[in-house]
Amino acid sequence: MKRARCLLQSARSAAQYGALLQSASSRQPNPLRSTQHQVLRCFHGSPAHAKGPPVPAEFINEDDKKGDKSVVVHDDLFERVAKEVKTKATFNKVVDVFIKGDVRRRGHVEFIYAALNKMPEFGVERDLAVYNRLLEVFPKEVFVPRNFIQRMFNHYPRQQECGLQLLEQMENYGIMPNIETKVLLVQIFGEKGHPVRKYQRIMYWFPRFKHVNPFPIPQHLPEDPVDLARFSLTRIAHDRDAKATVHQLPCTDITESGEKITLPHIVGIQSPGQVELLAKHNPSRPVFVEGPFPLWLRKTCVYYYVLRADPTPPDEKVEEPFDPERCLDYPLQLELDLDRDLGDEENFDVEDLDEGPVFAMCMTGRGEQAVLNQWISGLQEKNPILGRVPTLFRLDAGPRELQGVAETESAHHHGPEPETQTEERPPQEEHKKNLREQWRKSRGRARR
């Protein structure tokens, strides 16, 4: 009881003291009220206390705003330094400008991310020296863990993720790091850092997968269209004995009337086995020229055409015995007497799809029927049967469709010609339009 009375008396005295202070403050004028901005003292509140009002935008630190736009600023740096020409020298110049701009290398992570995105534009995405140059942007011996606890909790995670991203881009482009890359990674992240482990994995797997592709594609494809067509046809040919023949070289000719004519290149390929197969073809059955079919070589797309025939009917098929000495490396027929269990099924659902024989292939600069007729005429030197076999052309739009779209867009841009305005629609389009109108009217009646 005594303790409760003491607490009540102390509370009453505190209330009276506060009232006296309030009355005294109301009597005396406060000089701070006359100022435009009043500075208030901050009191510590409990966690359950409601949050205060948001901070005005004028009191936000400008460094926070710059942090969000740092990548954009570094992109502008690449554009400002390399305005006219984007080469390896200008890329290294941008890196030197950033390194000399600040001794502490502030914003180096954002700069490296921006540099990795800009590397394909400068043509240095496959240059190992440029990747090592980007590693030199990192401050040395700053992000090295000092004990096992820092090593276990991923010391400086943003910097290590940036180093991993740089090594992953090297891995995607097939660039094998060297000893200089390892020295730089050890100086930056230490011997137990995640980027160093990534380097060790790359050095373990890359030598094992270096020659795994039996048909490698060179990094730099030939620029000459004839050499590119010869390389492409040799790559997709089924037989190694197939020989590529240049039926026509690209050239420019001027007629008697002064008209300039450009002749495209025609490169074909045919194997001895295809020559024998075409010689046995029935002259009463036609052959077809089909295409164009796309073929991708890295980032380059080329188109080829094939000379083929329909599948042979079952009545005309003649099964020839296999020659055991025709191929000693890979036998064409195997006779294996395997023991079967009672649970094994002898009936298999295998669908044999016969697409017909392919007699030859070619690549040309212009996929027109007149140009492909020259290819067929050139094939008659080794295949005289083509003079007695009817040839039909099954040509798709292919790359010419893209050119047609570009031409129509340019025509819309320049405005329609007077002849096209007065041109009437074909009867098929009018018939389709009438059918659509009838269908819409029938739908409207059904809704009513």
Image (cartoon, grey):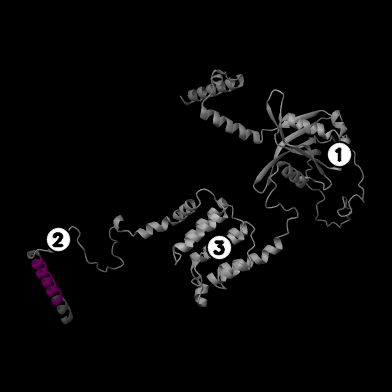
Q: Residues within 10 Å of mark 1 (few under 14, many from 20)?
A: some
Instruction: Find residue 430 and report its image quarter.
Output: top right
Left or right, 271 with reference to 150: right
Left or right, 398 with reference to 158: right
Task: Give the residue displayed 84% in from the left and 31% down from the top.
Answer: 386
- Read off the magenta span: 9-25
Q: Foreground: 46 or 395? A: 395
Residue type for callout 2: Arg
Residue type for callout 1: Val
Asked if residue 281 lies in the magenta stretch, the reply is no
Q: In this figure, what is the number of numbered marks?
A: 3
User: Of marks 2 and 1, which one's residue comes earlier in the chain?
Assistant: 2
In this rendering, the answer to whether 61 lies above or below 414 is below
Task: Give the residue displayed 28% in from the left and 60% down from the top.
Answer: 52
User: Of marks 3 and 1, which one's residue comes earlier in the chain?
Assistant: 3
Instruction: Find residue 14 and report its image quarter.
Output: bottom left
- Residue 374 position in % (x across, y down): 78, 31
Q: Main secondary structure of the magenta part?
A: helix
Disc 3/disc 2 C-alpha distance (Å): 60 Å
Disc 2/disc 1 C-alpha distance (Å): 105 Å
Furthest toward the bottom, the residue is 2
- Residue 116 position in % (x across, y down): 54, 56
- Residue 311 position in % (x across, y down): 81, 36
Disc 3/disc 1 C-alpha distance (Å): 56 Å
Disc number lying in front (3 or 1): 3
What residue is disc 3 on? 133
- Whether residue 164 can be seen here: no
What residue is disc 1 on? 275
Which of the labelled discs sits on residue 33, or is there none? 2
Residue type for callout 3: Arg
Circle 1 — which element? helix
Task: Give the residue displayed 57% in from the left and 55% down from the top.
Answer: 88
